[in-house]
Amino acid sequence: MSLWHIAWSYLWNRKLTTALTVVSVALGVSLISAVLTLRDETQRRFEEEGQAFDIVVGAKGNPLQLVLSTVYFLDAPTGNMDFEIFETLKGHEDVVAAFPIGMGDSYGGYRIIGTTRDLMDFSYGERAPYALASGRYFEAPFEAVVGANVAQDTGLKMGDTFVGTHGLVNSASAEVHDDFPYTVVGILERSGSPNDRGIFCDLQSVWNAHDHGHGEEHGEEGHHHGEEITAALIKLASPALRAEFKDGVNRTSNAMAAVPIWEIQKLYEQLLGTAKLVLLAIGYLVVAISALSILIGLYMAILQRKRDLAIMRALGATRGEIFGAVIIEAFWVSLLGIVLGWFLGASVCAALNSYLVAQIGFHVPPVRLSADLVAAYSAVLLMGLLAGILPAWQAYRTNVARDLAEL
C-alpha cells in the first residue's frame, strides 16, 4: 500500500475533522478566487469600454463623473454644453468620428440617450456594441432602439410605445412627457456593455421633448441654434493625440475634455485597488487560520495514532516514510480545499454576475486561471504543507519501543 493511499485512508478515518478543515481552507480560497476574478474581469471590461472612445467632452466639472455618466451610464452628467462646441470639435483635423449625446429623461430607470444615427454603426476591435437582435435603427424623432436589459426588464417589444420621465432615476413625482411617446423600432443584441441598459433615439427627440410645446418652432429638419447636448464622444486619428487634444479643449473652450481610459485606470488605482488589497488580506487571513486548523488537526491525529505509527515502523517503515505520510495528509487537505474553494468562488462570481449584468451591463465569467490566481493557489498549498511540518516531525520522532510497550 502506497504512502498516498495510507494518508488518504487516515484522513477519512476522521471524516468530520477533515471535512471541517477542508471547508475552512475552501472559504479562504473562494474569497481569493472571487476577488481576483472580479478585479481582473471588471477592470478588463471597464478598460475595454473606456478605450472605445479617445475623448469625452462635456460641461466643466469632475472628469471621472463625466466619463462614468457618458460612457458607462453610472453617474449624473456634469451639465450641458452648447451644440456649437460639438460642431467645432467634429470639424477638427484630428477627429475621425464624433457623436453627440443628449440625456435628461428615463424610462423604468433606464436612460433615454439622444444621439445621431451614425453612432449605431460604430464598432471597435472585434466588438459591435450596437448590433441589432431584431428590428432596425431609428430613422426619425421618437423612434427608439432599446438595449437587451431594457427589453428584458421592462417587457418592451417591437412596436410598443412608451413615454419618458424627466430625470435619470425612477421618481413618482417626476414630470412625465405624455405628449411625446416613443415607439420601439429595434432591440440591441446583448453586448455585455453599458449599451444593454440604454434606450437610444435621435437627438432631436430629446430636444423636442424638452421644448415644452415649442417643438413646432424648430421643426424636425435638424439641429438649430441655441440647443445643448450633454456630451460628445470623440474618436481621434491616433490615441497618441489624446493628451494634446484634451489640453486644447480644456484651454480654448467652455467645456471639459477627459480621456475615459485614464480616468478608469485612476479609479482602479486610487479606490478599487485598496478595496482589492483589503479583501485579499481577509482571504489570506482565512487561509492562515485554516492552515492552523490543519496543524492542530494533524497534530491531534498523530497523538491518537502513536501506536499505529509504531507498528508501521516495526513492520519496516522508515522515519522518512512516516514523515512523508503526514505531509501528504496536509497536501490532500490543502488540495481538496483549493478545489472546493474554486467551485465556491465560481458560484460567488455567478451570483455577482447577475447583479453586475443588471447594474452596469458587464458580464463576469466564472473563475478562470490566471498568473495571479495560480500564484495564490500555490501560496495556499505551501501554507498547508508548512502546517503539516510540525505534526510530521512529531511522527518522525516516534519512539517505537515505548509506543509498542503501551499496546
Image: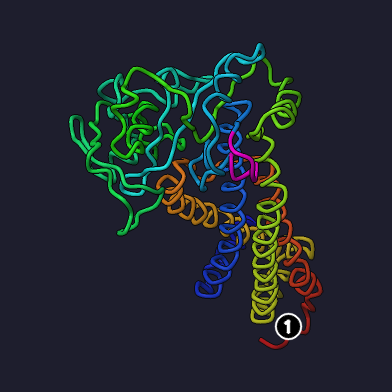
Give the answer, above or below, for where 400 lies relative to 235: below
8 on left or right of 325: left
Q: Please tell me which residue is depicted at 47% across the width and 24% down the height of the picture.
A: 225
- Tell me if residue 60 is in the magenta stretch: yes
Outermost residue on the top side: it is 93
Look at the numbered disc 1 and give the secondary structure of its residue: helix
Front in this rendered view, residue 329 or 122: 122
Q: Which residues are magenta?
A: 58-66
Q: Residue visible at 35% across and 54% down?
A: 170
- Dot 1: few (<14), some (14–19), or many (≥20) neighbours within 10 Å? some
Q: Which quadrant is home to the N terminus?
A: bottom right
Q: Which residue is mark 1?
A: 403
Amino acid type, mark 1: Asp
- Colour scheme of the rendered structure: rainbow
Q: Considering the image in quadrants, where does the C terminus appear?
A: bottom right
Can you give x and y, in whole percent of width and height, for residue 273 in the image?
A: 69, 51
Residue 282 drawn above or below residue 65: below
**386 relative to 400, above or below:** above
